[in-house]
């Protein structure tokens, strides 16, 4: 389906939960209250929404959270999602703390790639930034994941306090067959109070080590721009939502765990589907289709992250869907 601006919308990010087993400072501080269980969409409801989305041409899905793997039954849901007729691709974003035990089920389900959040390779800094996370647990999961036929991407938010980690993280793409992606800090929720680094600065630092870094073939469903080098086993990617606006090619909607379809991360506006799916009416599949279509047509031309006064979304990232 095309939006008002002629963009093809074929990608839906699904937040299974606002809960997480970490408390990353730029995402979910410990004092953010969790949504009640009754307010979270049931798996059967999410699948029904996905069926409506698929009927409109949305066939790529990202499962995220909060931390999706903390929700009971997440692996079974992912398997059902990948089996849904018309679904072309399902990927997962996780902090990696529960990933290692989940890998066999994810491979069996047919997940094509896994994004793992990793902002630093210093164990003490990792623990401080995440509210107690264990770096060794994440790295062990990464090593195990690399033995499987699933594409692995490491996501690092570009924070001023982790600037020294840009090169060490990039070195992982030298040693391992994976992508290391640097993401500009989003001025959403807690990210408004933190200082980030632009992707251009990160690229400049890395070109001092790998002068032959050049753009290579884009892969995945998102907006990352990838670079390769003869000295790298994997690729290095950059997602510069603030400094390199890619709104002209945006292909996504977001479904929050509470049943709101969000056309754009910058704005609080959304289309509620929870009342439709819990209304008991026999025509709810058609009404869901109409709701998805409204969300697509409500997509703005572009975000306004450069102007804080025009950002109307005030929820934290875990509440929206990371």
Image (cartoon, rainbow, N blue to C red):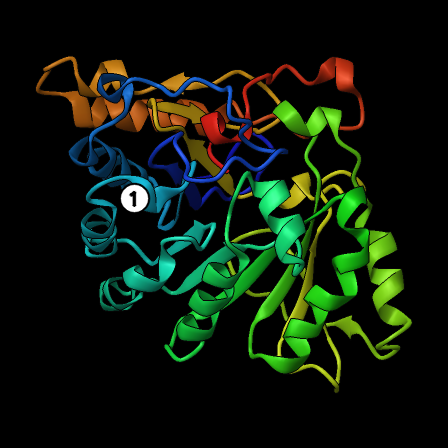
Crowd rating for badge 1 (residues with CA inside 10 Å; few <14, some 14–19, many 20+): many
Please identify the quarter of the rendering in which residue 233 is found.
bottom right
Q: Residue at x 58, y 79 (%)?
A: 176
**Residue 158 appears at what percent x and percent y?**
73, 47
Q: Residue at x 10, y 15 (%)?
A: 280
The answer to whether one can see residue 226 in this image is no
Q: Which residue is mark 1?
A: 54
The one nearer the camera, 261 or 205, is 205
The one nearer the camera, 304 or 210, is 210
Q: Residue at x 77, y 19 (%)?
A: 308
State the SS at label 1: helix
**Residue 78 appears at what percent x and percent y?**
25, 51
Of the 4 image quadrants, the one containing the N terminus is: top left
The residue furthest front is 124
**Residue 58 appears at what percent x and percent y?**
37, 44
Q: How many marks?
A: 1
**Residue 168 appears at what percent x and percent y?**
73, 67
The answer to whether one can see residue 118 in this image is yes
The residue furthest bottom is 230
Residue 321 vertical placement versus 227 (above, below)? above
Please identify the quarter of the rendering in which residue 146 is found.
bottom left
Q: Is residue 217 left or right of residue 221?
A: right
Q: Is residue 302 left or right of residue 118?
A: right
The one nearer the camera, 294 or 267, is 267
Q: Residue at x 65, y 74 (%)?
A: 173
């Amino acid at each position: 389906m095309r939006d008002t601006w002629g963009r093809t919308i074929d990608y839906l990010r699904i937040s299974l939960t606002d809960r997480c087993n970490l408390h990353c400072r730029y995402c979910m501080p410990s004092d953010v209250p969790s949504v009640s269980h009754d307010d979270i969409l049931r798996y059967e409801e999410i699948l029904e929404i996905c069926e409506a989305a698929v009927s409109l041409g949305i066939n790529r899905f990202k499962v995220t959270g909060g931390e999706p793997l903390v929700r009971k039954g997440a692996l079974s849901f992912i398997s059902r999602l990948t089996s849904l007729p018309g679904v072309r691709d399902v990927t997962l974003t996780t902090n990696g703390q529960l990933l290692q035990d989940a890998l066999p089920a994810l491979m069996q389900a047919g997940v094509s790639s896994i994004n793992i959040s990793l902002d630093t390779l210093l164990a003490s800094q990792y623990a401080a930034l995440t509210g107690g996370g264990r770096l060794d647990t994440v790295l062990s999961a990464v090593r195990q994941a690399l033995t499987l036929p699933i594409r692995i991407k490491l996501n690092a938010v570009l924070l001023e306090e982790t600037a020294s980690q840009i090169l060490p993280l990039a070195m992982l793409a030298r040693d391992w067959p994976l992508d290391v992606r640097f993401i500009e800090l989003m001025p959403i929720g807690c990210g408004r109070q933190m200082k980030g680094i632009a992707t251009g600065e990160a690229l400049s630092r890395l070109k001092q080590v790998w002068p032959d870094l050049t753009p290579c073939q884009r892969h995945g469903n998102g907006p990352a721009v990838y670079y390769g080098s003869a000295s790298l086993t994997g690729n290095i990617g950059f997602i510069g939502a603030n400094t390199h606006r890619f709104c002209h090619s945006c292909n996504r909607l977001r479904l929050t765990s509470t049943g709101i379809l969000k056309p754009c991360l910058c704005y609080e506006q959304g289309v509620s589907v929870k009342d439709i799916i819990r209304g008991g009416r026999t025509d709810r599949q058609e009404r869901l289709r109409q709701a998805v279509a409204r969300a697509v047509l409500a997509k703005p031309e572009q975000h306004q992250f450069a102007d804080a006064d025009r950002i109307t979304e005030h929820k934290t990232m875990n509440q929206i869907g990371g």
